[in-house]
Image (cartoon, helix red, strand yellow):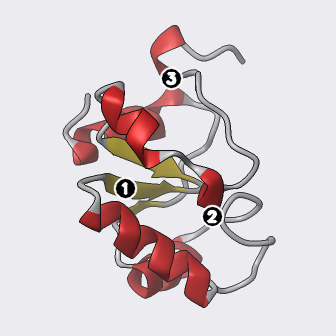
Amino acid sequence: MTFPKILRPDVCAKSVYDINCAELRSRGITGLIFDIDGTLVPHGMPPERETAAFFEKLGREGFSAVLLTDNDRKRAETFALSVGVPYICDAEKPKKRGFIEAMKMLGTG
């Protein structure tokens, strides 16, 4: 499935921890959407201390974030509460419905 251009990333980083917040801010980006498994942590693992600190840093730097995951509610909610960000579970990615909902939550869509 091909995403509409608005939903295709145009910035890549080796790790979420390598995201250049200043660059994003200079481009007017204020909201970020993250998957859990395979993006923030290995599949099925709990958040690491570094993960929660990362989301705290994003908030201090003026960014909003949301977790968009195909995981069930229990996994998503547990993880989201640990890192302090909202979530959308059972997203059925790559369908665009979840991405649009996340953008609305972030005030970017």
Q: Is residue 27 visible?
A: yes
Distance, label 1 to label 2, CA atoms, is 12 Å
**First in sequence: mark 1 or mark 2?**
2
- Residue 41 figure quarter: bottom right
Q: Is residue 70 visible?
A: no
Closer to viewer: mark 1 or mark 2: 1
Q: Quadrant of the N terminus?
A: top right
Tag of residue 65: 1
Residue denoted by label 3: 7
Distance, label 2 to label 3, CA atoms, is 18 Å
Label 2: element kind: loop
Going by the numbered disc 2, the residue's amino acid type is: Ile
In the rendered structure, the answer to whether residue 8 lies left or right of residue 33 reads: right
Total marks drawn? 3
Closest to the observer, 65 or 26 = 26
Q: Quadrant of the C terminus?
A: top left
How would you rate the neighbour count of disc 1 (Cα within 10 Å): few for under 14, some for 14-19, many for 20 or more?
many
| Vertical placement of residue 7 versus 12, above or below | above
Q: Where residue 8 sits: x, y (%)?
A: 58, 21
In the rendered structure, the answer to whether residue 109 lies left or right of residue 73 reads: left
Query: Mark 3–mark 1 contact, CB under 8 Å?
Result: no
How would you rate the neighbour count of disc 3 (Cα within 10 Å): few for under 14, some for 14-19, many for 20 or more?
few
Residue denoted by label 2: 36
| Vertical placement of residue 26 versus 54, above or below | above
Q: Residue at x 26, y 45 (%)?
A: 106
Q: Residue at x 44, y 76 (%)?
A: 80
Q: Residue at x 53, y 48 (%)?
A: 91
**First in sequence: mark 2 or mark 3?**
3
Distance, label 3 to label 1, CA atoms, is 15 Å
Q: Where residue 77 sits: x, y (%)?
A: 45, 78
Tag of residue 11: none
Query: Mark 2–mark 3 contact, CB under 8 Å?
Result: no
